[in-house]
Structure formats: C-alpha cells, structure tokens
Amino acid sequence: MTEQDVLFRPLAAGALHLPNRVLMAPLTRNRSHPDGTPREMAATYYRQRASAGLIVSEATQISAMGKGYKDTPGIYTDSHVEGWKPIVEAVHAGGGRIVCQLWHVGRISHVSLLPDGRQPVSSSPIRAKAQTFTANGFEDVSEPVALDLDGIAKTLDDYATAAKCARAAGFDGIEVHSANGYLLDQFLQDGVNHREDEYGGSIENRTRLLREVLDRVCDVFPADRVGVRLSPLGQANDMSDSDPEATFGAAYRLLNGRGLAYLHVIEQFFGQDTEEDDKALLRRLRGLFDGVYIGNGSYDAATARQAIAAGEVDAVAFGRPFIANPDLPERYRIGAQLNTPDQDTFYGGGSEGYTDYPALDPAH
C-alpha cells in the first residue's frame, strides 16, 4: 500500500472509522432459514470479507410483512438476534465493521411469502411489473394494498424494533434501505405514490415516511451510526417519478441536516448504461449532501480510484466482485487477478458459490 492510493486512505463515516474505502455492498444471497434466522455458514461468509472498509449486510427484513424473497434474513425476533450475533462477532474478530441494512420490500412480494397469505403493502394499491423469488422460482409479484395510517404507525414501530434487534446483535450501525423500488421508495416516488393524505401528493408529504423512520431508528442508534440508501435514477422494480430532481433533491436535503454516517447512492444498475443526463443529475444531487457519500454501480478499482481522487465519492461499495473475492481489498491493493463470480449460485443453495471462493495465496 502507498499513501497515494486513495482506496486505502482511512475514512471517518460518522462514528464508523473505516480503514479503507473498498466497501462491501448489501448482497441478497437467499440462504437463511425459512423463519429468517441466518444459517451458521453466514458467519464464515462474512468473516472471509472482514477486510472490507465496511460491510453492509444483505438486506434484512424488519417484519414478517416486510419479506419479499424466499430465505432472506430478518432482524425482528430473538432468534434473529441470536442468529446474527455470531456473524457480527466473526466480522469483529476479523478486524471488520458491519452495519445491518433494514429492509421492507413493500409491494415487491408475493402472497406465498407473507403471513396467512396476506397481500403485500405499499403506498398505493398499484401492482408492480416485477418478479420475486419464491418456492416456485421467480414469480410475478402480487397485487398490494395501500397502507392505512394504522399500518404506517405499525411499520414505524417495526423499524424501531428492528433497530433495537440490530443493536442487541452487536451491529456497528444500520443502513435504512430507501432504494430500488422497495417500501420507502414507493412512498418517495409519485409514479407509485398516488395517496391523498399526509403521506402523498406534495414532496414534503412523500418524504414524510423516510423522515419518520429516521426519527425512530435514530432514537436507537445515534445518527452518526445510521446510513441511508437511495436510488435517484429509479430504474428498479417498475419505479418512476415525474420530477426526480425535485423529489430526490428534497430527500438529499432532508438527510443532509441529520448528521448521518453516510449516504449510499446507487448510481448505475448492473447491465444498464447511465445516460449523460442521468450522470448530470447525480452530480447536481451530490452537491446537496455534505456528508460521507458512498457510490455504487459497476465500479472497478480504476474507476473507484478516479472518482475518489476527483472528490465525486468518498468511498465505493462493491457487489459482485465481493461475492467471488473475499479478499477484494488486497487484490485491488496489489493489482491481483479477480475470481469470476458464478451467477448460478448467487441466490439460494449451500456453501458452493458462497464460502468456497479462494483467497490469494498468502505467499504472494
């Protein structure tokens, strides 16, 4: 490592002190028990990747109604807490830091995944043109119902409970997932949010749920241990907004004044090109947030170095490269060849394609 290598300059993200800027993005792997308790092998998986500057856990549902995919983990029961504890301890034993990404999928779910076959919930009763992963493989998502005010109050309680469970499990912080067309994004963007109450219509109303979620979770973790994930380009799970710059500009301003650990932004989705107009929008939005900014989206070591050196991002979260390269920071540090990820083993299964990717030979 050299002092000139910006990837390995330490970074203070609120109260989180990161030794490098090669961060592990949240990666859904569908390997938990059916009740949402992580399996034992997850401790090995995360421990192998503890050299990341920060690990953001796979998306973890805050309630039974927040579940949208088969065999994803939860963080709302005692068994979930006990299942996550050895994972967090393993990361800490490896010198790492890990935050829990709190997730409610909203309408991106299926009745077979929810308690008593209930319909998914959303801001409005608009079915997404999207699919999810069930016991039968990929299926079209089910038609949702709109959350009423009592349902919103219950969801806020669920976020608080999940944050308390994450704290009990020993996580270093939490990340509020407000991206990719999941519940909080479904309230933010007016392509889905057609409400006429205090949670719909104006931008102030559409950002209300995110604001209230942050109020609740920041009563559990200090704000400087809380991050937020956004996707301003709205390219996932059938999302759209009539004025994304105004909507997400308001969201960035809302986050800017809260003393959060970081803002984590999906700037590009895998396999999709980002148009120049979209890149310009991201740059304009970037100027509205003064805190630590994490970029995510098809970066490699070279483009991450360029973006950090130019001050466009403070750190980069890597997804697929971390699946296949448990020691990704070291590989980037010395310029070693990367393992190739096996997409057939991304979702579900056992240790194959999960804990069996080789690290570098220590003799290198």
Image: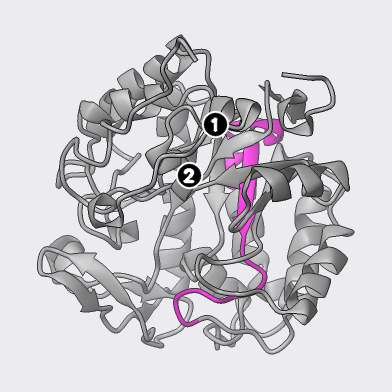
* Residue 232 appears left or right of 337: right
Residue 321 circle label: 2
Q: Which mark is on residue 308?
A: none
Q: On the rendered image, what quadrant is the N terminus found in?
A: top right
Could you say whether the residue bearing mark 2 is in a helix, strand or loop?
Answer: helix
Q: Residue at left 31%, top 24%? A: 43
Tell me where residue 83 sits by quadrant: top left
Q: Considering depth in this image, is 181 or 2 the residue closer to the camera?
A: 2
User: For the magenta stretch, what is the residue range?
Assistant: 215-238
Cα separation, mark 1 vs mark 2, equals: 13 Å
Q: Nearer the viewer, residue 285 or 190?
A: 285
Q: Is 222 situated left or right of 277 in this image?
A: left
The residue singled out by tag 1 in the image is 336
Q: Residue 90, relative to residue 309: is it above or below?
A: above
Placement of 91 over or under 264, stated as above or below: above
Q: Pointer 1: residues within 10 angstroms few (<14), some, or many (20+)?
A: few
Which residue does the image show at 55% across and 69% down from the upper left?
185
Identify residue type, mark 1. Answer: Ala
Is 311 magenta? The answer is no
Q: Name the spot of residue 87 as percent of width and height, x first.
A: 35, 23
Looking at marks 1 and 2 on the same chain, the residue that comes earlier in the sequence is marked by 2
